[in-house]
Image: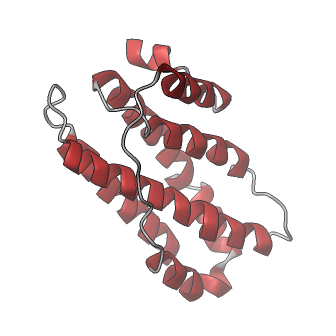
Amino acid sequence: MNTPIYNFFTKDHRRVEDLLERATRDIEHIDLTLYNEFRKSLLTHIKMEEKILFPAAQMANNGQQLPLQAQLRLEHGAITTLMVPTPDKDLVKVIKYILEKHDELEEQEGGMYEVCEKLTQEQTKEIIAKLQETTIVPVHPHNDAEYAMQAAKRCLQRAGYDYEEIVAM
């Protein structure tokens, strides 16, 4: 696909993935400065989808939720909770796995971006302008309390993933 909204979001996926790759190049010594840039970028990307793209597409769809919207929303919640603990090699492995599966649902032929693009084609310029104006999501310091990781694992399960299974792969 070579359309404005698809191109905007897939380019941003690659940028976010690159930040994660650079931050975790040495998995035993994760670059927390780069990782925090990754966190802000990923959370801002999710914000753009949840606050701008998905609502515009849903409105264009007579207010009806799109087929993939519920699953993607669950995954966004899970991904967001994974940003809370300090990263280690297991957490990074899970994040990369979830992002790969998640991005596929959005980018594949007939995926969320294509559906949104078709529904909102009359508003493309307005949507792109809003996306470009999106403010960066601030991040808090990591929280390594056990309850934070347990919450992340529960969110992953609701989205159809198992943290321990992914780590064991």
| Image coordinates for residue 22, horizontal then vertical, percent | 18, 46
Q: Nearer the viewer, residue 107 or 27?
A: 27
Q: Which of 99 and 47 is in front in this view?
A: 47
* Residue at the spot 28% in from the left edge and 24% down from the top edge: 89
Residue 161 visible in the displayed image: no
The image shows residue 41, relative to residue 79, as above or below, that is: below
Task: Using the rendered view, name the quadrant where residue 141 is placed.
Answer: top left
* Residue at the spot 33% in from the left edge and 32% down from the top edge: 86
* Residue at the spot 37% in from the left edge and 58% down from the top edge: 41
Task: Using the rendered view, name the quadrant where residue 161 is placed.
Answer: top right
Quarter of the image that includes the C terminus = top left
Residue 55 visible in the displayed image: yes
The scheme the figure's colours follow is secondary structure
**Relative to residue 102, is residue 140 drawn left or right?**
left
| Image coordinates for residue 6, horizontal then vertical, percent | 49, 67
**Relative to residue 49, is residue 85 drawn left or right?**
left
| Image coordinates for residue 62, horizontal then vertical, percent | 86, 71
| Image coordinates for residue 151, horizontal then vertical, percent | 58, 27
Q: How many circles with numbers are drawn on the protein?
A: 0
* Residue at the spot 50% in from the left edge and 85% down from the top edge: 129
**Relative to residue 64, is residue 162 drawn left or right?**
left
